[in-house]
Image (tube, coloured by chain):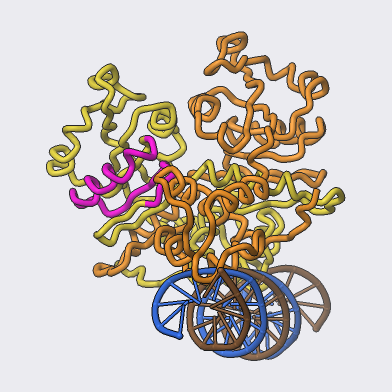
Chain colours: A orange, B yellow, C brown, D blue
DNA sequence: TAGATTGTTAATCGATTAACAATC
DNA sequence: TAGATTGTTAATCGATTAACAATC
């Protein structure tokens, strides 16, 4: 892998947004973009954009900007969204269903190959074409299939147990939608998606909103 | 409102996690916690925890720690999750359904009173007890009901239009699940939930994972 | 009293922003 | 050439961490 660049996390988190924005511009027939333009669209300082992009692709042209096509290629390659990533999803409730059926993830290389669930009513059915298997088959399935990622969409109480199973089976990353801090002995990549906490931040802003605010408070992203 | 304290955003984002953790400890019968303990559980520096908590509630006791009950009360009050917040949800697809049906939001004071949707098949039905109305009724509904928050769970292409409607109708906060940057003329509180971008960050970590990592990489939260 | 643990000040770290020479 | 816009260095800002006197 030629990609031995260590990026600050905030930079890494902005890259997908650059990618999405320039993809939109490309679809609109545009060929180059400037840091100024990206910054304006994404509420970022242009210097920030230049710094970020220069870290992964120092090929902007002074006086002209960035060529969209090669930049898009580079971002895709760098983020690693081009290569397929097999994943299993644990939990076939409302949220699990939404995740299994969301078409947008495909674009980022995610391929959910199986869903695991405890409710016998659901086992044997399909979720948008993905088979729902019994949670008891999880270990077995992971042993037989090369799966990089586990997505946890079970209630908080069950998350730790599921995470341990996934970790033990050699999954390398966990995308956790349960509101729990996972304790893992192995060094896994974990990303927590905590909607409840995010909602609480919104509630905080609502409560503490100054009566005259003159700028839209864009919290995160 | 006595709460005229301005908190750094990172601090505000940690508060819900403190709240959840100490709630768990309380349910386990515990009466006090130390910053040390909270830090260990949440992967935070104890000094960070003390600093955060001292900003909203300087009532920890040296040698003893924090009394859970009053701290919990204070966090609830401060975050504003105790008071009910009426919201409308726009979009009754898979994600919208998951959001409408998720029982956990209730705890943070969220009350979704109506869902709006364009698909005539869904209009007139209910989502976990919440009526699904035609999107054309949105303006009207907002005019007649005092709604603080709009939740956007429509496809990216429709998000901007919906956001403008919500803003025009006087909603004060938007929780946006569509992968779009909203451009609003009014100063609203906006929180973007961008699952695609988060997935891309995971993909990035998977691609650039050093072969021997000795610490679990907990990205965000 | 001795041990634990706070709140806070000061030191460190890292990210963002400003400035500008280089260059298309 | 003049105007636009880059990549990068230096300055600024803000958040995290360390240290410790105060105190339970």
Left or right: where does residue A143 sit relative to residue B122? right
C2 or B175, which is in the foreground? B175
Task: Give x and y (percent) for residue A44.
Answer: 46, 65
B34 or A45, which is in the foreground? A45
Say if residue B53 shows up in the picture. no
Q: Is residue A199 above or below residue A134?
A: below
Q: From the image, which quarter does the N terminus of chain B lie in?
A: bottom left
Picture quarter containing residue A156?
A: top right
Task: Give x and y (percent) for residue B10.
Answer: 53, 64
Left or right: where does residue A207 sit relative to residue B211? left
Picture quarter containing residue B157?
A: top left
Q: Which residue is pictured at 41% across the width and 61% down the height?
A: B78
Asked if the stretch drawn in magenta spans residue B199, the answer is no
Asked if the stretch drawn in magenta spans residue B175, the answer is yes
Q: Which residues are magenta?
A: B155-181
Q: Which residue is pictured at 33% across the width and 70% down the height?
A: B2
Q: Is residue A35 above or below residue B141?
A: below
Task: Give x and y (percent) for residue B195.
Answer: 52, 42
Say if residue A72 shows up in the picture. yes
Q: Is residue A87 above or below residue A108?
A: above
């Amino acid at each position: 892998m030629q990609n031995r660049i260590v990026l600050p996390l905030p930079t890494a988190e902005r890259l997908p947004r650059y990618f999405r924005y320039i993809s939109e511009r490309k679809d609109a027939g545009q060929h180059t973009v400037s840091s100024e333009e990206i910054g304006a669209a994404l509420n970022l300082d242009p210097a920030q954009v230049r710094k970020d992009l220069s870290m992964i692709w120092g090929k902007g042209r002074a006086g002209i900007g960035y060529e969209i096509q090669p930049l898009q290629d580079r971002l895709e390659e760098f983020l690693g969204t081009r290569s397929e990533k097999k994943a299993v999803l644990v939990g076939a409730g409302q949220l699990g269903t939404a995740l299994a059926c969301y078409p947008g993830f495909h674009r980022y290389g995610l391929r959910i190959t199986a869903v695991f669930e405890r409710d016998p009513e659901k086992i044997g059915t399909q979720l948008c074409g993905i088979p729902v298997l019994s949670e008891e088959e999880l270990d077995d399935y992971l042993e037989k299939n090369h799966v990089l990622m586990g997505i946890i969409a079970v209630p908080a109480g069950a998350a730790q147990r599921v995470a341990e199973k996934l970790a033990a089976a050699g999954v390398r990353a966990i995308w956790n939608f349960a509101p729990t801090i996972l304790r893992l002995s192995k060094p896994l990549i974990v990303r927590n998606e905590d909607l409840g906490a995010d909602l609480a931040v919104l509630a905080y802003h609502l409560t503490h909103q100054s009566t005259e605010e003159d700028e839209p408070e864009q919290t995160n992203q």
